């Protein structure tokens, strides 16, 4: 069961979490403010109310996870997001990352391949608060050609390789943040699209994500 009440206690726990994220090196104030404002416990069963504000990933439905707050903050910071930018997210999952982007006033397009997870968002309480987030059921390897080109792309599952269609759907100068690698560990990359269509690559820390899988799952 989930409860949708945001108390002073929850807000206090979030302040603690933001402090932890600062200590771990997150400096983008807009990212930290978004995390301060979003009730992460709404995304989990009420039995895990307190755990919601510990800096760790947590299982949700369908064997998937809600990413660790540090990972969400880290990827979002690497995006260097500006208000009203068009952002494509692959792997909606719990929807938490999408709402962080929405809270930062991005125009968000998020894709989930698991029908059950996608359907859950239809009834999620925070959904109406963010008309700037659009949810899609589909295969993230394909992207959303009719809604591009995008300023930013964020992949929240472990990509076995850089999906070429997603590079195509980026604006020149646009950035993609993507954990690449098969197996237990992935390397976080930031790609910047060049005028000739290729991507300049920067390499960051290692993370551990659930795999990005081809095709849809009903
Ligand atoms: N952004 C999420 C983290 C989700 S975990 C959050 O904030 O909670 C990764 C998600 O990616 C899972 O829900 C998984 O089903 C989804 N996924 C994996 N491969 C995908 C693909 N090809 N297209 C879209 N979603 C995919």
Image (spheres, grey):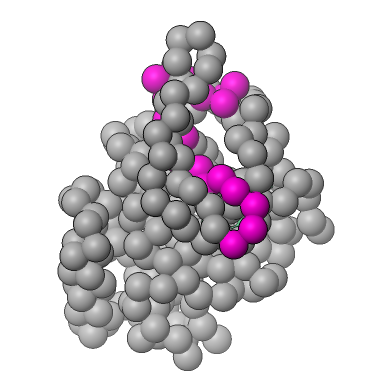
Span of residues in magenta = 167-184
Question: Which residue of the protein is positioned furthest toward the bottom in this rendering?
Answer: 47
Q: Nearer the viewer, residue 70 or 46?
A: 70
- Position of residue 14 in the picture relative to residue 65 (left or right): left
- Ligand 1 quadrant in view: bottom right
- Dominant secondary structure, magenta: strand
Residue drawn at (64%, 39%), measured in percent from left and top? 161
Residue drawn at (38%, 45%), measured in percent from left and top? 204
- Pinpoint residue 69: horizontal percent, then vertical percent: 37, 65
- Pinpoint residue 128: horizontal percent, then vertical percent: 46, 56
Residue drawn at (25%, 79%), measured in percent from left and top? 13
Q: Is residue 173 magenta?
A: yes
Q: Look at the image and tell me whether residue 146 can be seen.
A: yes
In this view, 168 is above or below 59: above
Q: Is residue 15 magenta?
A: no
In this view, 195 is above or below 84: above
Quarter assignment of residue 38: bottom left
In this view, 130 is above or below 189: below
Question: Which residue of the protein is positioned furthest toward the top in this rendering?
Answer: 196
Please identify the quadrant where the N terminus is shown. bottom right
- Pinpoint residue 43: horizontal percent, then vertical percent: 48, 71
How many numbered discs, if any? 0
- Position of residue 88 in the picture relative to residue 132 (left or right): right
């Amino acid at each position: 069961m989930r409860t949708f009440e945001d108390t002073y206690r929850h807000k206090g726990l979030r302040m603690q979490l933001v402090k932890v994220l600062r200590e771990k090196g997150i400096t983008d104030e807009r990212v930290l403010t978004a995390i301060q404002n979003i009730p992460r416990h709404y995304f989990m069963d009420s039995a895990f109310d307190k755990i919601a504000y510990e800096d760790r990933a947590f299982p949700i439905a369908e064997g998937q996870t809600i990413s660790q707050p540090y990972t969400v903050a880290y990827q979002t910071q690497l995006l260097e997001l500006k208000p009203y930018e068009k952002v494509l997210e692959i792997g909606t999952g719990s929807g938490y990352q999408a709402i962080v982007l929405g809270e930062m006033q991005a125009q968000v397009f998020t894709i989930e391949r698991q029908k059950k997870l996608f359907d859950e968002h239809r009834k999620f309480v925070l959904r109406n608060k963010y008309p700037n987030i659009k949810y899609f059921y589909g295969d993230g390897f394909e992207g959303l050609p009719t809604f591009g080109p995008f300023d930013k792309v964020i992949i929240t599952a472990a990509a076995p390789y850089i999906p070429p269609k997603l590079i195509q759907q980026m604006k020149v100068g646009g950035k993609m943040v993507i954990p690449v690698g098969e197996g237990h560990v992935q390397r976080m990359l930031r790609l910047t699209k060049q005028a000739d269509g290729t991507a300049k690559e920067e390499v960051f820390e290692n993370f551990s994500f659930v795999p990005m899988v081809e095709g849809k799952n009903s």
